[in-house]
Image: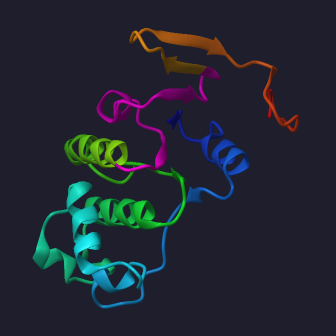
Amino acid sequence: MIVGRSGSGKTSIAKQLFPEAYIRSFEYKSRCILDDFPQELETSEITRMLCSVGFASPPDWLKSYDCLSQGEKMRVDIARALCLDKPLIVFDEFTSVVDREIAKVSAFAISKAVRRSSKKFIAVTCHYDVVDWLDPDWVFCTDTMEFDRKKECGRPLNSKFIGAALDCGRCFGSIII
């Protein structure tokens, strides 16, 4: 998870580190959201994925994307992303446009869905409350430039990334990637 206040570089870091996996939004052209999922997927696979991210309303599956609430749109986008043939999904503005109760319920459901799949999921958000709800394996905070990750025993490891060097050698502000 990448978290930090607006303008702190979250999106830039996510795009720079994970350009192939970065997802901001999808194009929706159909009158029914089910028809905008990849054609090779069975309807049962699509509905299972929608349910797994907390969008379990069959009547709403028949609506166009434009008729959905912001929370429903976010969950449909994440379900669609999880259906992609990609091992890693980086989802920007995670829970940024929904109220905190919907964010909490969605984060719990999405966390379970991702853990059941073989995918890796990186949420990019300005909301710190999501950290507890999503229960990520690691968190990079762009406000403090600190990286925290869980150890097997449950204790976090803390690192501060000021002028840190990572594998690939490209410079990105105070972070060398």
In the picture shown, does residue 117 fall above or below 142? below
Percent position of residue 2, x then y: 54, 36
Q: Give the color scheme: rainbow, by chain, secondary structure or one colour.
A: rainbow
Q: Is residue 130 magenta?
A: yes
**Relative side of 124 to 166, left or right:** left
Total count of labels:
0
Percent position of residue 88, x then y: 54, 51
In the picture shown, does residue 13 fall above or below 173? below
In magenta, the rendered stretch is 117-146
What's the residue at 31%, 60% (across, down)?
Answer: 75
- Residue 34 falls in which quadrant of the image? bottom left
Q: Is residue 119 magenta?
A: yes
What's the residue at 51%, 20% (across, down)?
Answer: 149
In the picture shown, does residue 137 fall above or below 12? above
In the picture shown, does residue 139 fall above or below 51? above
Percent position of residue 89, x then y: 52, 53
Comparing 66 with 146, the one in front is 146
What's the residue at 30%, 49% (across, down)?
Answer: 113
Percent position of residue 177, x then y: 80, 34
**Relative side of 4 to 176, left or right:** left
What's the residue at 38%, 82% (across, down)?
Answer: 36
- Residue 154 falls in which quadrant of the image? top left
